[in-house]
Image (cartoon, rainbow, N blue to C red):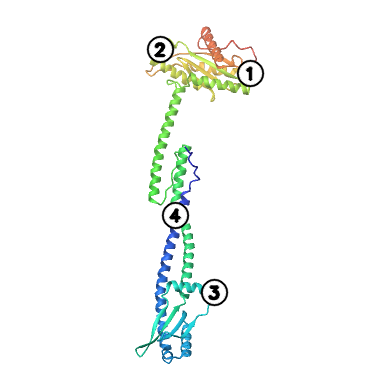
Amino acid sequence: MKPPAKRGPRPTLRTVLGRGHLGVALLAVGLAGISVTLLGVLALRVYANQNLHLIARSISYTVEAAVVFDDSAAATESLALIAASEEVADAKVFDNDGQVIAQWSRDEQGLLAQLEASVASTLLVEPINLPIIHQQQNVGHIELIGQGRSLLRFLLSGLAGILLCTLLSAWVASHLSRRLFSDIVSPLRSLAQVAHAARRERSFERRVPETHIAELNELGNDFNALLDELETWQSHLQSENASLAHQASHDSLTGLPNRAFFEGRLSRSLRSAERQREHLALLFLDSDHFKQINDRLGHAVGDEVLISVASRIQAQLREHDLVARLGGDEFAILLTPLNSREDAQRIAEKIIASMKLPILLANGDNISTSLSVGIAYYPDDGHDPATLLNAADAAMYQAKRERRGHWQVAHTESGAADIQ
């Protein structure tokens, strides 16, 4: 099976409209010019034949006496006098016996004379024979052949007029095609540009401008209405995706980032800290006696406590710090960048101090709780997320064993001096 032949570039709408306008204009002008020329030639042919008959009649009156008296010289003179001033190519006077007693021919040569003779022989009734009557008796006859000069001039002027009208029509067609391009093609091009932007770039906010052509304007309005629906759908879809992404990365109760989000941020922060030779701190927090609160007062009260604890922790952090709920009553904080160890310890103390104020429950009761905090430093206590989390978790449990509601630094530190 032969592969399909390759097509050349498709013509533009402007090219098609321009060619169509030009073709129709030239065809119309050509047909109109040919029709007018033919009608003119037919009319001129009738006029020329009538004119030749009048000339023949005038000659017959003039040479009547010369024919009667058989005066060839007088007949020739009279014949030449009239024929020379009229469009006559050849004229002959015959007597009653058919003998030529006078003859005159136009002595012209060249291409123009040949063309005139061809036109005359084609269009005129030749030769014209008219009897010479004397006292109601036929004494001879006249034979005339027309010149055809007027017909040739008319034909040439008609062709020149057709050519001029064709050139003028071509210019008018070109001008009209440009106007048509502006009126039709420009709105369609705008529509195509908006459609391409919507398809390729998902730019549903662009709109097709208005146009004064009713059908194209209605098409643009329908397309804009479709874009409105697509934009609404896209906005709704983006909102849904953002909501789903937030739900996938945040805790539904406290609104804090969840463990997966926190571990991803921790991994990126550790890589950045390694490249920039920076330090950071990881705080592991656990609520003291939270299980007793849940068992004694119920999970609803426990949820209220967790929400209040999360809010108080957030209030003590810096703008770029991150707090997440790892699960249950466990929270983690990433402090980056870290200028000194004292910054992490100071934040831990502020968080612990914020919990000294009792939590006001929805039913009006107050409840007190505290947090135990473990602190691990990068790079002293670990170079990867799991090691740092384990070090901070171990420090938090050590704080619980020694004295609940306090902070404890991980014991894995190498004893290096504080960060300057």
> Percent from the top left, x then y, of residue 133?
37, 87
> Percent from the top left, x then y, of residue 241?
44, 28
Q: How far apart are marks 4 and 2 (CA)?
A: 86 Å
- Camera-near label (4 vs 1) is 4
The quarter of the rendered structure image containing the C terminus is top right
Q: Is mark 1 on a helix, strand or loop?
A: loop
At x 41%, y 17%, the residue is 303
Pick whichever, 291 or 50, lies toward us: 50
Q: Is residue 40 above or below residue 301?
A: below
For label 2, the residue is 294
For label 1, the residue is 419
At x 41%, y 18%, the residue is 304
For label 4, the residue is 20
Say whether residue 77 is visible.
yes
At x 47%, y 43%, the residue is 193
Question: Which numbered tag is attached to residue 212?
Answer: none
Pick whichever, 168 or 193, lies toward us: 168
Instruction: Name the amino acid, label 1.
Output: Ile
Q: In this view, does 123 lie above or below 100?
A: above
Q: Is mark 4 on a helix, strand or loop?
A: helix
As drawn, is 275 to the left or to the right of 23? right
Q: Is mark 2 on a helix, strand or loop?
A: helix
Disc nearer the start of the sequence (2/1): 2
> Percent from the top left, x then y, of residue 88?
46, 80
Q: How far apart are marks 2 and 1 (CA)?
A: 41 Å
Question: Which numbered tag is attached to residue 110?
Answer: 3
